[in-house]
Image (spheres, rainbow, N blue to C red):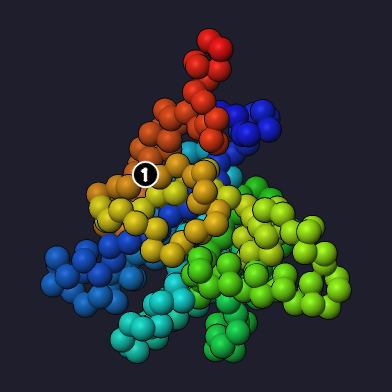
Amino acid sequence: MERPDGQPDARLHVAIIMDGNGRWARARGLPRTAGHKFGVDALKRTVEGAAEAGVGKLTVFGFSTENWRRPRGEVSELMKLMKAYVESDLERLARDGVCVKIMGRRAGLAPDILDVIERAERRTAQNDAFTLQVAFNYGGQADITDAVRTLAQAVKAGRLDPDAITEDVVGMALSSRGDAPDLIIRTSGEHRLSNFLLWEAAYAEFVFQDVFWPDYGPKHLKTAIEEFRGRERRFGAVEASKRAAS
């Protein structure tokens, strides 16, 4: 695989929309919160198997800006699961060389959640074997809006010339710092982005898998990556065979 600059592809950046917890639980006569609990186990399995599958960075959609509309009890359970995951796995992730990053809005989050986020980032900041990035209180439209606001404030203050605003400048103003995934996976059989990485998805490849997230694991990830590796990424150019013939 090659990137647009012609350089060899480094380890993959894979993003996953972890979908299907509620339907998985409903099919088993369980409350939705049970689906989220088993979804955390699926995340642990997938993170453990990602490096072996050739992934260098895994970005997962943990909690969206729209998820606050869910029932209060479910939101509370999701917050508890976030804390429990960090508290149970942080030291192991740190020992394994995993760098944890959290992207999304932090304003308005409860102090205990902010503490967990900041502690995870501080503890793993120097690691570089693998990156786990969690989109938490994140929405693609909100993230672009925040980036535009930041750039507008810089222009107003005289720190930025409007003519200097390029795609790279906008990308760096996003919470992802413009780091686009090579592959975006969505589980559960749904075929939509749901406000995830809207800017960064411009030239990502998509794989949709008909498996609920609590059942997900390394074998599903490897299947998606195998499909991805069978594709030719053109980034707006023509096919390699046509380039060679021209």
Judging depth in this view, the residue of 237 and 76 nearest the camera is 237
In the depicted structure, whether residue 195 falls above or below residue 14: below
Q: Which residue is drawn at 14% across and 65% down?
A: 27
In the depicted structure, whether residue 223 falls above or below residue 76: above
Check the picture and name the quadrant holding the C terminus: top right
Location of residue 180 in the rendering, given as x and y in whole percent from the top left corner: 58, 50
- How many marks are shown on the rendered structure? 1
Check the picture and name the quadrant holding the N terminus: top right
Identity of the residue furthest to the right in this view:
158
Q: Residue at x 67, y 53 (%)?
A: 167
**Mark 1 residue crowding within 10 angstroms, few (<14) / some (14–19) / many (20+):** some
Residue 169, visible in the rendered structure: yes
Judging depth in this view, the residue of 171 and 23 nearest the camera is 171
Location of residue 47 in the rendering, given as x and y in whole percent from the top left corner: 48, 53
Residue 136, visible in the rendered structure: no
- Tell me which amino acid carries mark 1: Val
Location of residue 216 in the rendering, given as x and y in whole percent from the top left corner: 33, 52
Q: Which residue is denoted by mark 1 in the rendering?
A: 207
